[in-house]
Amino acid sequence: MEILEKLKQVVPEDRITIGPDQLASVSKDESTLSPVTPLVLIWCMSADEVAAVVRVCIESKTPITTRGAGSALEGSTVPCENGIVLDLSRMTKVENFWPDDLQVEVEPGIIYDDLNDKLKNDGLFFPPSPGGSGDIASIGGMVATNASGIYSLKYGGTREYILALEIVTGEGEIIKLGNRAIKRSSGYNLVELLSGSEGTLGIITSITLKLSGIPEGRLKTAFKFDDEKSAAQAVSEMRKYGLDIAAIEFLDRHLMHALNKLKDYKLEEVPALFLEFHGPPAVLESNSELASDICSELGGSPLKLADGQNPWEVRHWATEAIKHFKPGYSILRNDVAFPISNLPEMVEYCHKLGVEHDITMFTFGHVGLGLLHALMLARQDDANEWQTAEKVNRLIIERTLKLGGTISGEHGIGLGHKDQFESEHGRSVELMRRIKRSFDPHNILNPGKIFDLT
Ligand SMILES: Cc1cc2nc3c(=O)[nH]c(=O)nc-3n(C[C@H](O)[C@H](O)[C@H](O)COP(=O)(O)OP(=O)(O)OC[C@H]3O[C@@H](n4cnc5c(N)ncnc54)[C@H](O)[C@@H]3O)c2cc1C
């Protein structure tokens, strides 16, 4: 294979493989989309190596799919036909740390939880906290998907924390974007442009992040409700009051059942909100009292978790619980987001669609941000059932867009939502195509993801 020989000239041979098992292991991500086996898997250890690989690929127009941990949920990490996978998971160094400035510079392969472990002795953390994947997601992947999580309600998503990036463009140039100033009015914001670009504009080889101080105190609490709509209304009310809440997670009754089935947690199988407050003790108390009042007005009452049970550990298993709920069934997912006042209506709408179409439906998510995951179970080998689930998914997305929302609050577009991308963005997709051509004129960086170039 010609490309293989050329790659061996720029990266040591022991970091290049065409072994079938290793190629199979990077042929997919965590979506249910079909795997695509790449021609070659290559591990790079520096920006210079990445740039050299890009230049080799330009000659043969070979597509490159950059891979962090491969935990993406919409197929953005599924390799392209006749493409290579460029794996950055071995680039895990903390390159610089400025605790007094609350800033850190890291390589892209470092895992979210590992970074926070390193920061904690200095009283700092990187907050976005993806609910179920903090232990696997790489910082490069989080930047490329603009990941968010349980604490994004108070602290924001990944994009809000990126100060500077080093990238390799589709021309094989190494370019630095941004700087360490936390406020700037200096030209176009290319740093933000890269966040959410899913490996289509540049390969990120270094990331400078802002950090937050670890809060003085934390208070975790949980409430149960008679029905999903009331729980959603409570969220909307808490937001209206401007309550300072670090996290609000919603779990519907079906998910509570699935969690019991997977982990035997003995949870009450009712719609629930898991809440966390951050701050000094007096603030924690007053905020949680107000939240409790709002919940009780909507029929909510405290939900007792088993002694010592951490709500975030329970929440961590949400996707796995759904995945294993019905053997032989696959997940069809979305992660829509919309203005918060629509949350009660959207939760109710999803469940109504599930009942009407006889599809098992789970709703949950970081709802304080107006972000809802509606996950459906259907058999991929039952064409009728799968198409019904796809129809329900389309209806949820259509309703979201009518409400002024987005197809993706956090997982990205990848291949899974590519078909609906234009209905959200209209003619601005043409501008995006022009931007893609400027960064990647040979169309080799993860081509065909998010949108097609032509
Ligand atoms: C159980 C579970 C729970 C999850 N929960 C959440 C959640 O709460 N919130 C959330 O936001 N996401 C969640 N996710 C999705 C996923 O973990 C995130 O999208 C995460 O940011 C992906 O990181 P990764 O390292 O696995 O990226 P990958 O899957 O390796 O890559 C994702 C995309 O980024 C690109 N990319 C990766 N690294 C680079 C780089 N260095 N330069 C350029 N492009 C790059 C890839 O090409 C691909 O397009 C969850 C996933 C699972 C399996």
Image: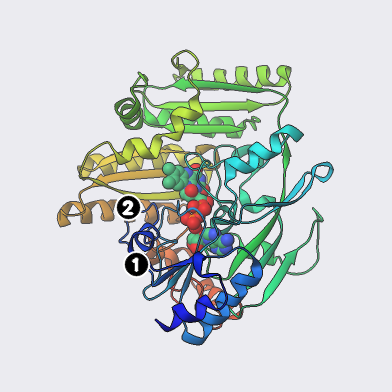
Vertical arrangement, residue 319 with respect to residue 265, above or below: below
Where residue 368 is drawn, which disc sits there? none
Give the SS element for disc 1: loop
Residue situated in front as seen by the camera: 155 or 55? 55
For label 2, the crowd category at 10 Å Cα-Cα, with few meaning under 14, some 14 to 19 and many 20 or more, is many
Residue sitting at 46 percent across and 76 percent down? Answer: 63
The amino acid marked with disc number 1 is: Thr
Residue 161 percent location from the top left of the image: 68, 50
Which circle's residue, 2 or 1, is located before the other in the chain? 1
Residue sitting at 17 percent across and 54 percent down? Answer: 381
- Residue at far bottom of view: 59
State the image quarter where residue 268 is shown: top left
Q: Is mark 1 within 8 Å of ligand 1?
A: no
State the image quarter where residue 40 is shown: bottom left
The amino acid marked with disc number 2 is: Asn
Residue situated in front as seen by the camera: 88 or 348? 88
Residue 157 percent location from the top left of the image: 61, 47
Residue 147 percent location from the top left of the image: 55, 50
Vertical arrangement, residue 352 with respect to residue 184, above or below: above
Residue at label 1?
37
Residue situated in front as seen by the camera: 244 or 210? 210
Residue at label 2?
393
